[in-house]
Amino acid sequence: MSASDKKLLRRSALAYLYTALGCGAFALIYEHFSHGVYSPFMTCLFAVPLLFGLWPLGWLLFSRGRAPGRLSRRLWGAAAATLTVGACLRGVFDIYGTTVALVSVYWWAGGLLAAAAVLTGILGHRFDAS
Amino acid sequence: MKQKRRGLWPLLYGTALVLFTAYVLLDAFVIPRRYVTVESDSSGSSISAVSADTGQTNTAAQATVTADSYSDGSISIQITTYRVNNTSVYVADVTLSDASDLQTAFAQGTFGKNITQTTSSIAKSTGAILAINGDYYSARSGYVIRNGVLYRSTSAGASQEDLVIYADGTFALVTEGETSAEALLAAGARQVLSFGPGLVENGQVAVTASEEVDQAMTNNPRTAIGMISPLHYVLVVADGRTSQSTGLSLYQLAGFMQGLGVQTGYNLDGGGSSTMVFDGSVINQPTTNGKTITERKVSDIVCIG
């Protein structure tokens, strides 16, 4: 892996880590004022960007090939953002005590984007390898 | 130019995500949707259907009203305030001669979403002498049967525990997994309230010390309704989140209601929604943040008269 790829992945992993810290802080403050009402989606909000950050970290640590292409990284980022916002909203709705069917759009969109990111990442490498 | 194009995708997707999220929030909390408007009678009451099917009218001409009681021959109400676990608890002991006087009403006389009014204003528009907030059906899923009309048959899940008030005034606790809204209506249900959980069943406390509404694990303002015997009920509201009142856990509330002699007791929407209105005045201390005493707008009430 080239030095520029390593730098790119390191920056990407750090961005996910900082986002996870921000989400954790937001959830702590939100649940502090929620009169003892909690939601697992809010409590574990930090985990979404943290888990998404494992992918660039995994590439950095275990892959000797090139970093995933820009399209794959963009799709991965969009998936992370979509699922993080979805989890945050679900947490807000849980704590308020309501259910909103439109939240499922986030799970579907985030899942599809993540799958597309993995697919384009793999296919991109196969094209590179050939 | 290439750099600009590279930044375009995150910008576009971010904008789309923000706009969609704004729509979801507006849809959840702001945009009103009217599904069914309940027909009003000539006096402006939104509960004319209840009176119509019994053929009785509730004239308050001969009513005797004091600061904490009401009696008109067919309805008797006595308000008592207790101090329980450092909390003010308001109990309306209600005796009826006709079960149809135990009624419910929607905000703005309309079944819908994000259609709200304060408990006191709904009570005023329906002419109710006594009212408490209901189950806030519009923020939740679950069966909705009001005054003998089925408005929603969507289940909130098999384990959702509902309170059924039958035409003869008896209460029953059912789970939505064991029956349908249509079956409840066919069995004579006049009201189905979908919040919960059931607090007292067959005179026994039906919740555990650790049980709470969804993920709530602390004391809170509470609203509950209980049947001591057919046509003899208690409507209970507990303050909370204030320096004067810490609030009650569901277990404490259930124990208190059991002590009142309740055979079937049920928890309604609590927190900032908890409100009791008697003779046009709010008698408890409703609050949403523990600092200001304000009445929250709700989607429905349970009322007498």
Image: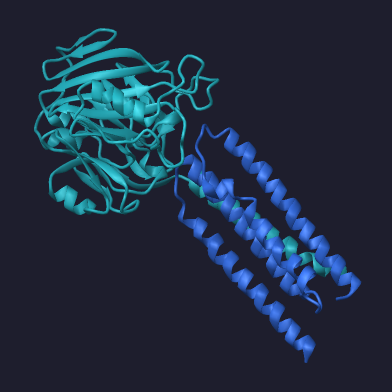
- Locate residue B160, reporting x and y percent: 32, 47
Residue appearing at x 25%, y 35% in the figure: B40
- Color theme of the render: by chain
- Locate residue A117, reporting x and y percent: 67, 73
- Locate residue B126, reporting x and y percent: 28, 28
- Locate residue B45, reporting x and y percent: 25, 30
Query: Which residue is nearer to you in this view: B188 or B271?
Result: B271
What is the tally of numbered marks visible in this picture?
Answer: 0
Determine the residue located farthest toward the bottom in the rendered image: A130
**In the figure, B115 relative to B44: above or below?**
below
**In the figure, A55 relative to A130: above or below?**
above
Determine the residue located farthest toward the top in the rendered image: B66
Residue B1 seen: no
**In the figure, A116 relative to B252: above or below?**
below
Residue appearing at x 13%, y 44% in the figure: B188
Look at chain B in the picture and name its colour: cyan
Query: Which residue is nearer to you in this view: A70 or B209?
Result: B209
Left or right relative to B152: residue B190: left
In the rendered image, the quadrant that contains the C terminus of chain B is top left
Query: Which residue is nearer to you in this view: B39 or B90?
Result: B90
In the rendered image, the quadrant that contains the N terminus of chain B is bottom right
Chain that is coloured blue in the picture? A
Determine the residue located farthest toward the right in the rendered image: A3
Left or right relative to B62: residue B260: right
Residue B221 seen: yes
Residue appearing at x 51%, y 41% in the figure: A38
